[in-house]
Amino acid sequence: MELFRDISINIILLFGMVFVFTLPETGFDRKKPLVNAIIGMIIGVMTIMIMINAWELESGAIFDTRSVMIGATALFFPPISAIMASLIAIGYRITLGGIGVYAGSLSIAFALIIGLIWRKYVAPRAKMHPHLQFYLFGLLVHLFVVLAQFTFPYPQSLTVIMRVGPMMIIVFPLVLTLMAISLMNHQRKVDNQYLLVANEKRYRTLINSSKLGIFQYDTNGVIEITNQAFADILKTTRAQLTGLNMTTLPNQNIVACVKDSIEGIKSVYEGNYTSFLSGYEFPVRVQFSPIYEEYNVIGGIGIAEDLTEEYAQKREVELFKRKDRLTSLNNRVSFDEALFKNKDDFNYPVSLVIFDINAFQIVNTTFGYDIGNQVLKTVAEEINTVVASYPQVSVYRTGGDEFSMIAEGYSESYIDRIIGEILQQTQQIDRYDITIKLSYGYGVSNNANKPLTESFNEAVVKLLENKVYEGSSISKKTVDIIMTTLFEKSPREKIHSERVSKLAQEIAKEFNQNSQFINRVKLAARLHDIGKINISETILDKPALLTKEEYAIIKKHPGSGFKILSSVPEYSDIANIVYAHHEHYDGQGYPRGLAKKAIPLEARIVAVADAFDAMIEKRTYRKVLTVEEALVEIKAHSGTQFDPKVVEKFIATMQRRKEKTMS
């Protein structure tokens, strides 16, 4: 009974020391070795106190719970602390001396070594309840402690094991388990405390670094915490905001949101807000949310976002949706909104004018879309220059090459004056190789009884009438300008076109057709290479053979010519002839692979004249053929590349030329 009494006192002392040690609400910083060493010294002193109150079996043989203390230390404290405590305990045991000095020292060493190994290798991999793990650890430690008793002299060692062994195998593992549970719970509490502090730091950092205004208030609506962003949004200071009772604010919508959140209801305010602290007015969105603690509302949190930039971006987007990106004029969306707005909102009379650039399709086809876009921008600038002097006049780009104007409060004489200025201004544009001329049409609503849509329809009809009157002459003139531009790029093309036109006309006469047929062939032959306007001079006048890629570009010119000429109603037949002048009689030509009579007769004639002139034309990269050699070549391809009947007429034409020369 004396053994159990003394050991019980020892255990009580052990837990008392553990209780004292777990009182602080702090853990151990393993990054500070000196601190850990001091902690180890403290645990070592506590272990000595346990050993002072040990049960002495006989002189030099003392027993206590030091193994429990050191084992728990190795399991939960930094290794430096455990080693320092063990060295102090072993040193003290050695100073006590006696026959049990080896057993006592080994017990401390076993508890330390097993604890460190268990902590590093077993605990991280163990898949069992912590309490069971602690018990198995304690059992293993004290099995080795029992084995350490064999260092007593025989047979005294057996007597010692018989007397203290059961206590060490049964009671000590349970004591170590209870101590480990106590330390584990303390460590969890400390970890949670650290986590709470860390989260609070992160929370405050997040709040203070957030661009959103964040503020927290109590159940009375009084602001307790706010970040700098919220003060910046309101153009005030955090000191002025802290302690502010939001239920007394002039903005009753804000007050209602605060009260809702205090009652547990989330709410959002969005709109203009004027700060009574700074007088600053701005658009804002604020979300008010309740804060709960154990199902009770203890206050609320607000998140405020300054919407000044967002609203500005929305206005820009809305403006962008109503502006033409190329010309910066109002676009069709804006025009339709103006056209269909309330008729009572207009200042009558209201005139609606539509302008259209004549032959603009030819500009795009011939000179490319970049030049076409420049023309549109220039026309828009000139129109804007004119209307800038006239208030209540709005200009819109309502189509590809169509501009519209809505003028309020002007008489028809004023509208005629504005139109005249615009036409004069645009006709003076001389930046491009074409003449720019506008057609127009307009309608007038003198009062609300005549819808603006009706005036719009009138303007469309007048515009079409005007285009029929002016469009053809402008288009033909544009074609002439294109041919002049081509001939300036490549003088060789001018000579070639004139010779082909003359020869094709002579061949056409051999068919005994009317003059219209002959004139069609002559004009088509002159314009047959108009599509080359889009091809660079480096390719047109290249002194060497064309590459595969360059030849592919050349082969596009019949299609380009067709697009240009088909834009002019009078040239629709000519366009088809030009489109087909590189087709072969056997269907092996380009661009469509037409054959025989599917190819217009005029095109078959131009094809022979074009090929013959190319053969006798001087080239640096090939031998020039004589007329006789070229005739042989044409005959050789009769029925394949060329129409046999056209070849026959061509031979006759060349014979007449020869006879005329000889005479």
Image: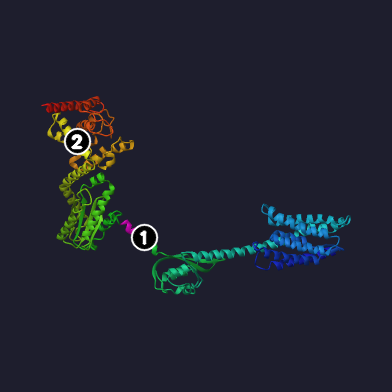
The residue under the point 28% across, 38% down is 542
Q: Does 12 sit above or below residue 142?
A: below
The residue under the point 19% across, 42% down is 569
Q: Earlier in the sequence, mark 1 or mark 2?
A: 1
Helix, strand or loop for disc 1: helix
Q: Is residue 132 visible?
A: no
Helix, strand or loop for disc 2: helix
Tell me the amino acid under the disc marked 1: Lys
The residue singled out by tag 1 in the image is 314
- Rendering quarter of residue 580: top left
- Rendering quarter of residue 130: bottom right
- Residue 516 image position (x, y, % from top left): 14, 35
Chief secondary structure of the magenta portion: helix
Q: Does 245 sit above or below residue 382?
A: below
Tell me the amino acid under the disc marked 2: Ala
- Residue 457 image position (x, y, % from top left): 20, 52
Q: Confirm whether the magenta stretch covers residue 450.
A: no
The label on residue 515 is none
Is residue 361 shown left or right of residue 312? Answer: left
Write the start and end of the magenta stretch as one range.
312-322
- Nearest the viewer among 567 and 105 is 105
Q: Is residue 326 visible?
A: yes
The residue singled out by tag 2 in the image is 525
Q: Residues within 10 Å of mark 2 (few under 14, many from 20)?
A: many
